[in-house]
Amino acid sequence: MSNQNATDNNTSSGYFITFEGGEGAGKSTQAKMLNEKLQQYGLCVLQTREPGGSIGAEDIRNLLVTGNPNRWSPTAETLLNYAARDDHLTNTIRPALKAKKIVICDRFMDSTRAYQGAAGGVRQSLIKHLEKEIIGPTTPDLTLIFDIDPDIGLARTHNRDHGHEDRYENKPKSFHQTLRRSFITIAENEPDRCVIINADQSPQDVASSIWNTVKTRLNIL
């Protein structure tokens, strides 16, 4: 194994990878697998998630992912997500990138665009303003968008132990169909950053697709 060229294009900072997609796409499992694979190459990796990833953001996570599906308006959800994201960026993501680590984040800004924007109806102008003010230049270098039929993804969620974090899973089917279309549109609009991953494969095949993309982007030999 060689990591000789793994950080050639990241001499001043680390590398920021985000995983995006609808419910039950397998992002969390694949994020863990990629983390382990990169560490086998001797690379420093931080695996995190949203909402969450820092003490303050984890407190806000509980407000967002539990309870009645109509607990918050989409605008309130957007503001809560960005309050969590600000804390996450300040206390977790930016310090790790400054330390030249590879950051793998399960969900980030595209989830707000899809969940609250496209599916929730929040003005894109508000979301773009929050991105500019809170994310600024700390945008992902690579975003892997997990694409799966919502019926298949939601069926998967019924077989996993997620405690009470099922608020979004309980939203109507039309919501999840809109999510899928939105994520595809994001990928089509930003092809240099986004790569679509067919999540309706075996975990091993999904992991192989991810690795082929990541090793090329990081110049891993």
Image (tube, rainbow, N blue to C red):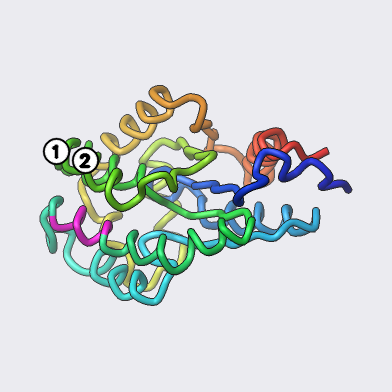
Q: Give the secondary structure at mark 1.
A: loop
Query: Can residue 205 be seen from the camera position used here?
Result: no
Q: Is residue 75 left or right of residue 176?
A: left
Give me the C-alpha separation between circle 1 and circle 2.
6 Å
Count of picture labels: 2
| Disc number placed over residue 123 in the picture, else none | 1
Q: Quadrant of residue 39?
A: bottom right
Residue found at x 28% / y 70%: 60
Q: Quadrant of residue 99?
A: bottom right
Tag 1–tag 2 contact (CB < 8 Å): yes
Image x and y of residue 175, in percent: 23, 41
Q: Is residue 149 above or below residue 35?
A: above
| Disc number placed over residue 85 in the picture, else none | none
Image x and y of residue 23, in percent: 38, 49
Residue found at x 62% / y 41%: 206
Q: Residues within 10 Å of mark 2 (few under 14, many from 20)?
A: many
Is 122 magenta? The answer is: no
Q: Residues within 10 Å of mark 1 (few under 14, many from 20)?
A: some
Q: Given the image, on which type of amino acid does mark 1 rest?
A: Arg
Report the front residue among 69 and 54: 54
Query: Can residue 118 be seen from the camera position used here?
Result: yes
Of the image marks 1 and 2, the number of the one nearer the N terminus: 2
Q: Is residue 16 above or below residue 43?
A: above
Q: Given the image, on which type of amino acid does mark 2 rest?
A: Gly
Report the front residue among 169 and 115: 115
Q: Which residues are magenta?
A: 76-82
Image x and y of residue 182, in percent: 31, 32
Q: Main secondary structure of the magenta part?
A: helix
Q: Residue furthest right?
A: 1
Q: Is residue 12 left or right of residue 169?
A: right
Residue at image mark 2: 117
